[in-house]
Image: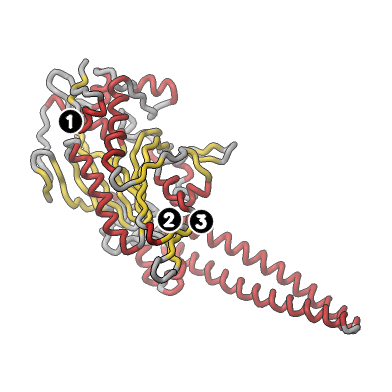
Amino acid sequence: MIDIRALRENFEETAELLSRRGLDITVVKDLYDLDSRLRRAVAERDQLRGEVNEMSRQVGEAFKTGDRERGEELRSRSKELGERLESLTAEASEIESQRRDLWLVVPNLPDPNAPLGLSEDENVIRRYWSPEDGESEIAPPLAFPEYTKKPHWEIGKELDILDLERGAKLSGSMFPMYKGLGSRLLRALSSFALDQHSDAFLEIHPPTFVKTETMISTGHLPKFGEEAYHIEKDDLWAIPTAEVPLTSMARDEIIDGVELPIRMTASTPCFRREAGSAGRDTRGLLRLHEFDKVELMVYSKPEQSQEVFVDMLSRAEGILRSLGLTYRVLDLCTGDIGQSSRRTFDLEVYSPGVDRWLEASSVSWCGDYQARRANIRYRDEESGEIHSVHTLNGSALAWARIFAVLIEVNRQEDGSVTIPKVLQPYMGGVERIRH
């Protein structure tokens, strides 16, 4: 949640930043008004509670001194005040509930340095990288051999490493099934990435079903409930990303500041209903209800967050470079960043099989937005003061599209697919997938 004090003290600035995300100014004004009403109701309630307590004291004193008539009079007035207090308490509780409901769906304040824009068309490409040309500010030539321009779903079927038909038979469309060396390649990607992050990130194997409050902590609820899988009987949610359980690892805790930054990584399946994308990218592995991903998650102090952000992006890029994949880095505009993010960079890999750039990673700095929702704080080791942590997350990487691009760009003229050298040890020495 945004810092409500910023709304109270700097309404115009806060409203202007939120307008960059396309948020209607009336929503900001409604939140401000509810907060003002709540503070007035709480102040009146607390004052009245004090009066009721004083009246109760006077009632007791009157009866104690034998002044029964005055005691009964005071008791009657005390009852009236008590009924008014009960009404005010209920009113304050109702306003607080309304404020919380609205507060939870108001997005994070975008970083002032994030590009202005309201749609993905206004995202800014910061740089490219290709195995042949290295890093560049201009797009590299996408001169892939003709035999690599076959879509991955056809390659996977030819090599018997991807069985989308049986996956659909088992679970419905957009639930893939990998086979044989395809399954091993998927496992190899996760093992390779986890090893690459083991120098600084603690590996976690979290649950893949979480409570409602865990989903609320990251901002996935209440706004994105339609996009998630919910088990109503148990009130549990299938995680859309390991960011969800990892963010709540320290929910309602105070961390010793000397421990920060705390870095975590996890390899998990991810589940998304993709309710708002019906009919889009339904072939192959481009858009799925279930996919595997290695996630990076960090708690940091505010002053550590930018260095952590750069490191996480560098790690995601490093894996793409190790795999020899052409990619570009997008700085997402204010209207395209996720609800909880202040700044997000996406990594998109080029797929010769479908002739498109495909998102493979998002690295986001969320400031203290998620920490406020999850009540994650730290005690400064010097001042002893308590502050909200900053949270950062990023995929390094999501594998479905990486798998797709890998088997396209590494396809040979004879139809076989070579395995990148960094993955061969995880493939038991297999260098090539053949018919």
The disc labelled 3 sits on which kind of residue?
Asp
For marks 3 and 2, give the one nearer the viewer.
3
Label 2, secondary structure: give it: helix
Count neighbours of disc 3 (C-alpha within 10 A) and say few if under 14, some if 14 to 19, many if 20 or more: some
Residue shown at 50%/59% (left/top)? 102
Q: Which residue is mark 2?
A: 370
From the top left corner, tell me how far across and down residue 109 is, in percent.
Answer: 37, 62
Count neighbours of disc 2 (C-alpha within 10 A) and say few if under 14, some if 14 to 19, many if 20 or more: many
Label 3, secondary structure: give it: loop
Q: Which residue is mark 1?
A: 421
- Pick whichever of labels 2 and 1 is earlier in the sequence: 2
The answer to which quarter of the image holds residue 182 is top left
For marks 2 and 1, give the one nearer the viewer.
1
Instruction: Identify whether 17 is placed above or below 187.
Output: below
Distance (Cα) linking label 3 and label 1: 44 Å
Q: Are marks 3 and 1 in contact (CB under 8 Å)?
A: no
The answer to which quarter of the image holds residue 167 is top left
Work out whether residue 61 can be spotted.
Answer: yes
**Quadrant in which the N terminus is drawn:** bottom left
Q: Residue furthest top?
A: 435
Q: Nearer the viewer, residue 319 or 154?
A: 319
From the top left corner, tell me how far across and down residue 257 is, in percent.
Answer: 40, 61
Instruction: Identify whether 206 is placed above or below 68.
Output: above
Instruction: Identify whether 187 is placed above or below 235.
Output: above
Residue shown at 28%/30% (left/top)? 188
Q: Is residue 347 left or right of residue 80?
A: left
The disc labelled 1 sits on which kind of residue?
Lys
Residue shown at 80%/78% (left/top)? 77
Q: Which residue is mark 3?
A: 252
Q: Is residue 93 left or right of residue 390?
A: right
Count neighbours of disc 1 (C-alpha within 10 A) and say few if under 14, some if 14 to 19, many if 20 or more: some
